[in-house]
Image (tube, rainbow, N blue to C red):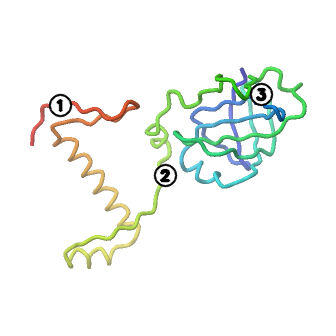
């Protein structure tokens, strides 16, 4: 099986958490497929592009340069799934070939969590709040700069989360099987 060393999109090196490159065989022909687990920031940057200039460096030193097309977005972890049509399979004899009805698609999500991805690169979302506050707090907030407010709210939320987890009598564990609750023995 062919392993990927690095990928550049439009000349920019992309951090991948996992990836796979393979040949997809369908009734209409063959395509070279590239699947990558990336950060939510990278996905957001490229998800609306139709065509991307891709440079793929393989572990064995080979380099593939191609214009690839973005496939439909998948559910689960943030992924970029790209493809390009192939006319000649001679160069790709050592690649895995996956057929339309195969169940042997590379499983690139295994062993990776969204939390790990966000530790590497946390996306920033713009949030608008409508609050009912005492007038003195409202006036004070109006005098603050946007960057200061971002920091204040971010720190306040993290402090609140820490307080909630230390004062809680129960730990909530979120996993693939749903939410489980265990008693910690702590009481308010």
Q: Residue at x 36, y 61 (%)?
A: 151
Q: Residues within 10 Å of mark 3 (few under 14, many from 20)?
A: few
| Label 1 sits on residue | 183
Q: Residue at x 20, y 78 (%)?
A: 136
Q: Is the N terminus in the top left, top right, bottom left or bottom right quadrant?
A: top right
Q: Is residue 156 left or right of residue 99?
A: left
The tag earlier along the polypeptide, 3 or 1, is 3
State yes or no: discs 2 and 1 in contact (Cβ < 8 Å). no
Q: Residue at x 63, y 51 (%)?
A: 47
The tag earlier along the polypeptide, 2 or 1, is 2
State the CA–CA distance, disc 2 to disc 1. Answer: 32 Å
| Label 3 sits on residue | 61
| Label 2 sits on residue | 123
State the CA–CA distance, disc 3 to disc 2. Answer: 33 Å
Q: Secondary structure at mark 2?
A: loop
Tell which of 169 and 178 is nearer to you.
178
State the CA–CA distance, disc 3 to disc 1. Answer: 53 Å
To which quarter of the image does residue 143 belong?
Answer: bottom left
Tell which of 62 and 74 is nearer to you.
74
Tell which of 30 and 39 is nearer to you.
30
To which quarter of the image does residue 35 belong?
Answer: top right
Q: Residues within 10 Å of mark 1 (few under 14, many from 20)?
A: few
Q: Is residue 120 left or right of residue 88?
A: left
Relative to 3, residue 80 above or below: below
The x, y position of residue 148, in whole percent, is 36, 66
Relative to 70, residue 86 above or below: above
């Amino acid at each position: 099986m062919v392993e990927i060393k690095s990928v550049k999109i439009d000349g920019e090196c992309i951090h991948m958490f996992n990836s796979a490159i393979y040949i997809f065989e369908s009734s209409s022909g063959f395509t070279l497929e590239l699947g990558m687990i990336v950060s939510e920031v990278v996905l957001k940057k490229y998800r609306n592009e139709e065509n991307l200039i891709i440079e793929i460096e393989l572990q064995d030193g080979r380099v593939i340069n191609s214009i690839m097309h973005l496939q439909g977005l998948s559910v689960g972890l943030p992924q970029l799934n790209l493809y390009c049509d192939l006319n000649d399979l001679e160069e790709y004899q050592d690649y895995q070939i996956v057929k339309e009805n195969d169940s042997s698609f590379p499983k690139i999500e295994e062993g990776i969590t969204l939390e790990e991805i966000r530790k590497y690169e946390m996306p920033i979302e713009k949030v608008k709040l409508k609050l009912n506050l005492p007038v003195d707090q409202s006036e004070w907030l109006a005098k603050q700069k946007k960057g200061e407010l971002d920091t204040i709210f971010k720190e306040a939320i993290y402090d609140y989360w820490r307080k909630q987890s230390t004062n809680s009598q129960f730990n909530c564990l979120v996993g693939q099987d749903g939410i489980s609750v265990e008693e910690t023995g702590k009481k308010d």
